[in-house]
Image (cartoon, rainbow, N blue to C red):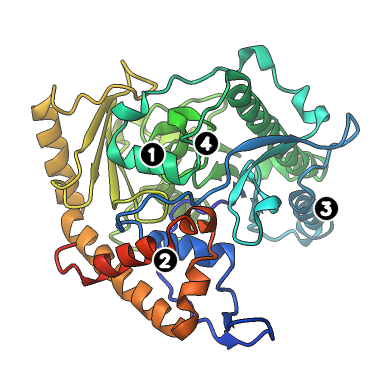
Amino acid sequence: MLGCKRDYVDGFAEEERISHQDDGQDGLYLRGSLSQVSSNRVEAWTREVQFLLRQEGRPVSELVGNMSTVRVMTKDWTNTDEATQWIRQTGAVSHEPFALYLGLNLPHPYQTRSLGPTAGGSTFRSSPYWLTKVSSELVSVPKWLPMSAMHPVDFYSTVTKNCSGAFTVDEVKSIRTFYYAMCAEADAMLGQVISALRETGLLNNTVVIFTADHGELAMEHRQFYKMSMLEGSSHVPLLITGPGLMSGLQVDQLVSLVDLYPTVLEIAGISAPVDLSGHSLLPLISTSSDFSKKSHSDWVLSEYHGCNANASTYMLRVGHWKYITYSDGLSVPPQLFNLALDKDELYNVVFKFPDVQAHLDKLLRDIVDYPEVSKAVHLYNKEAFSAWRDSLGSNYSQVIANLRWHMDWQKDVFANERAIDEWLSDSDG
């Protein structure tokens, strides 16, 4: 299995304990407290605080190397080399069933080194070699709503992703072109794996799955990165090939990443546990499947509780309808998009189709009690942040001021700390 390894949900199920470390410099620091991971966590915990701080570097494109520079993401290529070496030296000679997972960072944007160790990934980097694989004349420039017309959560995301400033058409097109070039490089890694399987005679009896855990907005909706239920972020590739599977088939059925687990189990001939959220995809793609007896949910659910979005977010996709609701379903307005008529998701028609909203909201609540989930996440955020702050002791002010948002934070340190104190003390907030 080849997957693009990216962190789709930045919620934090496992608490990380950070120990004190005296580095001999002014003040007391925490090991890892200035890391990118710590910034992600603190930003997620404090997303409901009443401030707007840039949490990412401004997205940029960066040209490296020349026409002979094929391996831009060297770590991914090293892992791909190791995977194909294993196929040739172990998989091909063992004559035993095997499962191989190869996780790639591409086409995830690169960390912006100039912004220091807490920086996120906002650099779209490629070489002239890969840029020649992209038909730049076909790269579109997405339409944007005016900032004043944006949904409040989308507005928050745009600001925290450092995309609220001015961008020229050339800048936007360059970022998107470089992103597609990065996709081309990832495609070549998949090609290397396929070639190794073909050359060792394994391709005809091996199932290959290519997918990712999130997409890339690439300046759609005045955003880059993920953390959104809009199509650029939530709609991911899923390609499956192997023996007994139909060739050239494009399935219209809505499916989800939770379907991969039961699919892999069925491929391996292992009985799936009862009450799984997902369904095997084999009935949709197998040559021996009885099409009349296919059974699969007609909806897809996604939820997000991390940074760059200031409310718990829930998306239900049914047919051409996409329903997005937030928090308790009341305090933040919902969104409804008809993707058949509005593929760019520019027109929120939630007030135009109240019956559709009511139906989808009831269905969503039948699947997950999202107001209760939001309440639990809200409580967790406060408790986790308080524990983190207490662990820092007198060093709290210095550490929080030097997270990824440090440039904005320094503009009014006391106001930002006060906003956090008010959030923690608000029993209703």
Location of residue 139 by image quarter:
top right
Residue 298 left/right relative to 122: left
- Other-residue count near label 2 (Cα within 10 Å), few / some / many at <14 / 14–19 / ≥20: some
- Other-residue count near label 3 (Cα within 10 Å), few / some / many at <14 / 14–19 / ≥20: some
Residue 332, visible in the rendered structure: yes
Question: What residue sits right under mark 3 in the picture?
Answer: 88
- Residues 222 and 323: in front is 222
> In 3D space, how far apart are the residues under numbered discs 3 and 4 (Cα atoms)?
27 Å
Single out the mark in the foreground, 3 or 2: 2
Q: Determine the residue positioned at 74% across, 41% down.
A: 189
> In 3D space, how far apart are the residues under numbered discs 2 and 4 (Cα atoms)?
25 Å
The mark that comes first in sequence, 4 or 1, is: 4
The mark that comes first in sequence, 3 or 1, is: 3
> In 3D space, how far apart are the residues under numbered discs 3 and 1 (Cα atoms)?
33 Å
Single out the mark in the foreground, 4 or 1: 4
Q: Determine the residue positioned at 39% across, 22% down.
A: 344
Question: What residue sits right under mark 4 in the picture?
Answer: 237
Question: What residue sits right under mark 1 in the picture?
Answer: 255
- Other-residue count near label 1 (Cα within 10 Å), few / some / many at <14 / 14–19 / ≥20: many
Q: Do the residues labelled 4 and 1 touch (CB within 8 Å)?
A: no
The mark that comes first in sequence, 2 or 4, is: 2
> In 3D space, how far apart are the residues under numbered discs 3 and 2 (Cα atoms)?
38 Å
Picture coordinates of residue 33, whole percent (x, y): 55, 73
The mark that comes first in sequence, 3 or 4, is: 3
Residue 12 tag number:
2
